[in-house]
Image: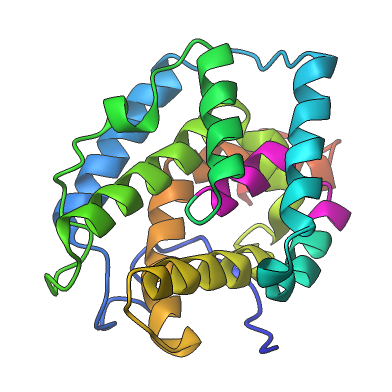
Amino acid sequence: MTELGGLDIGSPDEGVAGAPEALSEEAKQRFAAAAAAMQQIRREEKQSRKRDDQVARTIIQFLGQDKYAHLFVLISRLVARDCPSIFILAVLSLIHEGCLREVKEYLHSMGHKSAEETVDESTAITTSGELDPQMNRDLVAWITRMQLVLSFAPEKILLQLMIDEKNIDGTVLQLSTFVVKDFFETHGKKQKFETIQPLTASILQAVFEPFIATVKQAFTQQKSPGATPAEEEA
């Protein structure tokens, strides 16, 4: 399995602008606007023990299916980093009905609309026009679900994934790329991992970008708890 290294979270377009399947400008703007709205309604996450148990059972159910064996190591790496399980489920929800159902129930329990009700599903994901309408709708909903889950606890999720103040553990990019690759294959569009990766990186940038400034500050404070704001900016 190819090691991709960290996903740079400092500049959304760097390294992916020339990709044949880059996220369209319209899509970036729509998701940025949606994320801004999500932050306005963000409230403290309060999960019940029952919900935690159900999330864990859903991941176990996923891991019990042989056709997803190629994802097990990557999921284990994210679990080892204490990445909240609900975000892992959000990533997997593009290709697994059980994960999708659990994320929808989670969002409902948090008093939020579904992903489908949050963003216009007609937003064009790519500039090439290769995606059929259903694939486009599914990807829009997937991106929005990840943003919604992230909006409830961005620090809790991203701090576990950050390896330094500019990079996120490349495992989340690898896992997401395999998920998108599997999604394309279920729609009869076989693509190489290397072909899918730029699109996935662009998607993750769109998902993470609205929360990066706040999380970077929290990351710096976590690493240097005694630092003053002036020292952090120096």
> What range is drawn magenta here?
78-93
Quadrant of residue 33 in the image? top left
Q: Where 54 sits versus 158, above or below?
A: above
**Residue 98: x, y in percent?**
60, 41
Viewer-closest of 222 and 118: 118
**Residue 149: x, y in percent?**
55, 33
Viewer-closest of 90 and 198: 90
Query: Is residue 80 found left or right of 121 in the rendered image?
Result: right
Q: Where 72 sits versus 53, above or below?
A: below
228 within the magenta span: no
- Identified at 11% across, 70% down, the residue is 129
**Residue 157: x, y in percent?**
68, 41
- Identified at 38% across, 40% down, the residue is 144
**Residue 35: x, y in percent?**
37, 34
Main SS class of the magenta portion in the image: helix
Whether residue 85 is visible, yes or no, is yes
- Identified at 35% across, 42% down, the residue is 141
89 within the magenta span: yes
Q: Quadrant of the N terminus?
A: bottom right
Total labels: the figure holds 0
- Identified at 41% across, 64% down, the residue is 11
Q: Where 147 sits versus 21, above or below?
A: above
Identify the coloring. Answer: rainbow
Query: Is residue 10 found left or right of 124 in the rendered image?
Result: right
